[in-house]
Image (tube, rainbow, N blue to C red):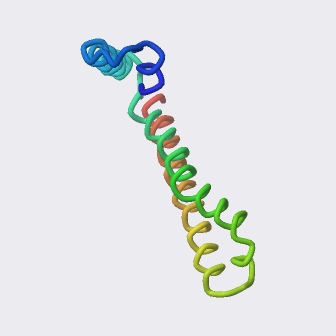
Amino acid sequence: MTSLEETLVKHNNKLLSIIIKTIVVICTVIMALFVPFFGYIMEFVGGFTGISASVLFACLCYFKINRESWNFGIEFIFITVILVSRFVVAGIGNFTSIKDIIKHVG
């Protein structure tokens, strides 16, 4: 939504900004009303991207930036435990959302 505003609003026009935000919210509500299983689809997308963006990529980037953390110390163990647990959480979340979608389709 921010990039849409930055593209369309040139002179810090608050009224146009409010109109754009309102249109985006209305479009989202319409999608939720007319697309079957919209909530389950959003659950799947959120489970996949949320875990990836907030935890997995952060830990992997830390490993990439800080080469000293590759020594098998306590820091390496904690980060590895976080990565493994988040992979499990992401897998369970995605499995659950796919299961819900299949259950309601059939």
- In the rendered image, the residue lying farthest to the bottom is 73
Quarter residue 73 falls in: bottom right
Percent of width and height locating residue 85? 55, 67
Percent of width and height locating residue 102? 51, 35
Q: For this rendering, which residue is in front, 72 or 82?
A: 72
Is 30 left, or right, of 86 in this rendering?
A: left
Q: Is residue 4 visible?
A: yes
Is 13 left, or right, of 103 in this rendering?
A: left
Residue at x-position 41% and y-position 22%: 36
- Tally of numbered discs: 0
Residue at x-position 64% and y-position 65%: 62
Q: Is residue 33 visible?
A: no
- In the rendered image, the residue lying farthest to the front is 11
Residue at x-position 70% and y-position 64%: 65
Q: For this rendering, which residue is in front, 87 or 5?
A: 5
Percent of width and height locating residue 105? 47, 28
Residue at x-position 60% and y-position 73%: 79
Is 67 left, or right, of 44 in this rendering?
A: right
Quarter residue 69 falls in: bottom right
Quarter of the picture containing the N terminus is: top left
Is 78 left, or right, of 21 in this rendering?
A: right
Q: For this rendering, which residue is in front, 74 or 102?
A: 74
Percent of width and height locating residue 94? 53, 47
